Image: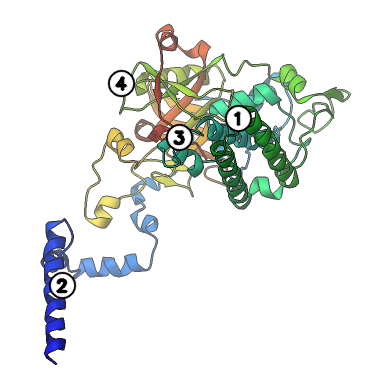
């Protein structure tokens, strides 16, 4: 019995010491917990609100009724478009956006009906190139320890279906493009998650094999041969779910009524691109960013933020919003759509298709304030570029200042407002991040920044996040 009491006393003393030590080390002790619990006890209207919130979605309750008036869909300047694309359950918004910019040009110049390029064609090559990017990265870092931050980053991010405009430019320049009917979507291209997980697992396995071979003294030539054999396996896996990319095909344009305007001709993917688009995507465009956490009027490059190993990292000019808006307005006035990306999930009313910081009143619902500015949201990883769309319209007031903007989305025609989203200029200020414009719309002072030596940022920089 004495032994039992002694043991009990020892346990109680240990618990008391632990509680005290926990409080001293920043934990929640019993006294603090009691103070927290007593700080809020729902009663009256607060209890009624709690009951409602327990049974309903937060956004349904926070939805501001003041923003439910008839939607203003007038835009003083807009680029014509035909048909809304649908990326379905995939992270290919970057690819759909880039191709939507190109197809708008082709439809206008060729005077054809609704038309789409094959997204799965370029996505096939994207996944093969990203696999090579990872495997070559493993070879390049083979002398670093496995817990080195770069090696760790590579194994955590062997591949994704997200991306940026540099992926579009490098892939199209290297592989060309084809009409959607030549290589149509598949089940897996529309629902990429399951196969992506399988392919990432295989790539990690290959990465481990390469490091083991390097540790055993394998030279670079041996490792390169191993990598080629591994890429053959990747290619086989891709063919099984996406099909074989065409090397030659026949095609002819159709008018708005679906009738052929001429006899079909034979093309390769690159000759098709050269004839109907012909842009120098790698040199004719400038990538712009609004990142208030870093100095403006400087260029930045993010390491490994690319799709092709021998391609281009995401290189951008960081600018104030007013400069970016001026170029966007000039492009729209000249009937040219743009690659645009933002933090689309913030204050999105997906039913009406609006992006407005007044869509939801979280502050009154929860009885608190949300005070972080754009810089603080970026630094704390609360906000970043998450989705790419095609900027197509702006509404200007009598003084030429924008009041709202419109983007063509790739979530299908039934999503948002007829497949588009309408954002207030205030929302644009807070959650817009990237814009790609033709250099002819960029003033000389912007292009001069590209002549400076860029600041190279690590792969794990917050701005790396690929659009999905």
Q: Is residue 172 above or below residue 385?
A: above
Mark 1 to mark 4 CA distance (whole Å): 43 Å
Q: Mark 2: which secondary structure?
A: helix
Q: Is residue 48 left or right of residue 33?
A: right
Which sits earlier in the primary sequence, circle 1 or circle 2? Answer: 2
**Residue that protrudes farthest toward the front in the picture:** 217
Q: For mark 3, what is the residue?
A: 144
Tell me whether the residue at label 1 lies in contact with that at label 3, contact meaning CB atoms closer than 8 angstroms: no
Please tell me which of labels 1 and 4 falls first in the chain: 1
First of labels 2, 3 by sequence position? 2
Which badge, 4 or 2, is on the more N-terminal residue?
2
Q: Is residue 413 visible?
A: no
Residue 219 — which label? 1
Chain-order first, disc 3 or disc 4: 3
The residue tagged with tag 4: helix, strand or loop? loop
Contact between marks 1 and 4 (CB within 8 A): the answer is no
Q: Answer few, some or many: residues within 10 Å of disc 2's Cα (few below 14, many 20 plus, some between 14 and 19).
A: few
Real-space Cα distance between discs 2 and 3? 44 Å
Query: Which residue occupies the foreground of this view, 237 or 259?
Result: 237
Quadrant of the rendered image containing residue 99: top right
Q: Residue furthest right?
A: 263
Q: Which residue is mark 2?
A: 15
Q: Nearer the viewer, mark 1 or mark 4?
A: 1
Q: Label 3's element?
A: loop
Q: Quadrant of residue 290?
A: top left
Residue at numbered disc 4: 295
Mark 3 and mark 2 in contact (Cβ < 8 Å)? no
Q: Residue at x 11, y 74 (%)?
A: 13
Q: Position of residue 125 (x, y in %)?
A: 67, 33
């Amino acid at each position: 019995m004495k032994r039992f009491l002694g043991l009990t006393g020892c346990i109680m003393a240990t618990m008391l010491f632990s509680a005290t030590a926990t409080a001293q080390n920043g934990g929640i002790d019993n006294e603090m917990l009691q103070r927290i619990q007593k700080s809020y006890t729902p009663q009256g209207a607060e209890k009624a609100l709690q009951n409602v919130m327990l049974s309903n979605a937060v956004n349904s309750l926070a939805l501001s009724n003041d923003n439910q008036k008839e939607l203003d869909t007038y835009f003083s300047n807009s680029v014509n478009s035909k048909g809304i694309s649908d990326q379905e359950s995939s992270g290919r918004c970057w690819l759909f956006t880039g191709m939507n910019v190109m197809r708008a040009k082709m439809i206008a110049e060729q005077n054809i009906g609704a038309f789409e390029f094959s997204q799965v064609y370029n996505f096939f090559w994207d996944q093969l190139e990203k696999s090579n990017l990872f495997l070559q990265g493993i070879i390049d870092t083979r002398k670093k320890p496995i817990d080195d931050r770069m090696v760790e980053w590579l194994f955590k991010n062997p591949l994704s279906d997200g991306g940026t405009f540099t992926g579009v430019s490098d892939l199209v320049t290297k592989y060309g493009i084809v009409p959607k009917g030549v290589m149509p979507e598949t089940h897996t291209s529309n629902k990429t998650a399951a196969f992506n997980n399988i392919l990432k697992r295989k790539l990690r396995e290959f990465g481990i094999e390469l490091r083991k071979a390097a540790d055993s003294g394998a030279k670079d030539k041996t490792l390169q041969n191993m990598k080629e054999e591994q890429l053959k396996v990747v290619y086989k896996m891709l063919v099984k779910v996406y099909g074989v990319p065409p090397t030659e095909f026949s095609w002819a344009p159709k008018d708005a009524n679906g009738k052929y305007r001429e006899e079909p001709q034979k093309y390769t993917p690159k000759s098709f691109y050269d004839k109907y688009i012909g842009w120098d995507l790698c040199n004719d465009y400038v990538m712009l960013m609004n990142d208030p956490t870093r100095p403006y009027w400087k260029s930045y490059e993010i390491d490994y933020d690319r799709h092709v190993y021998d391609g281009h990292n995401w290189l951008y000019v960081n600018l104030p919003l007013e400069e970016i808006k001026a170029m966007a307005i000039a492009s729209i006035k000249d009937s040219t759509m743009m690659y645009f990306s933002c933090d689309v999930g913030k204050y999105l009313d997906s039913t009406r298709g609006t992006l407005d910081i007044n869509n939801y009143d979280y502050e009154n619902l929860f009885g608190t304030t949300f005070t972080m500015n754009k810089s603080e949201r970026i630094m704390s990883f609360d906000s970043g570029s998450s989705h790419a769309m095609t900027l197509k319209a702006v509404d200007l007031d009598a003084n030429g200042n924008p009041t709202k903007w419109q983007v063509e989305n790739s979530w299908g025609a039934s999503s948002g407002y007829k497949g588009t989203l309408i954002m207030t200029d205030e929302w644009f200020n807070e959650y817009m991040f990237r814009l790609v414009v033709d250099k002819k719309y960029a003033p000389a002072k912007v292009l001069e920044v590209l002549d400076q030596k860029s600041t190279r940022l690590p792969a794990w920089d917050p701005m790396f996040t690929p659009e999905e």
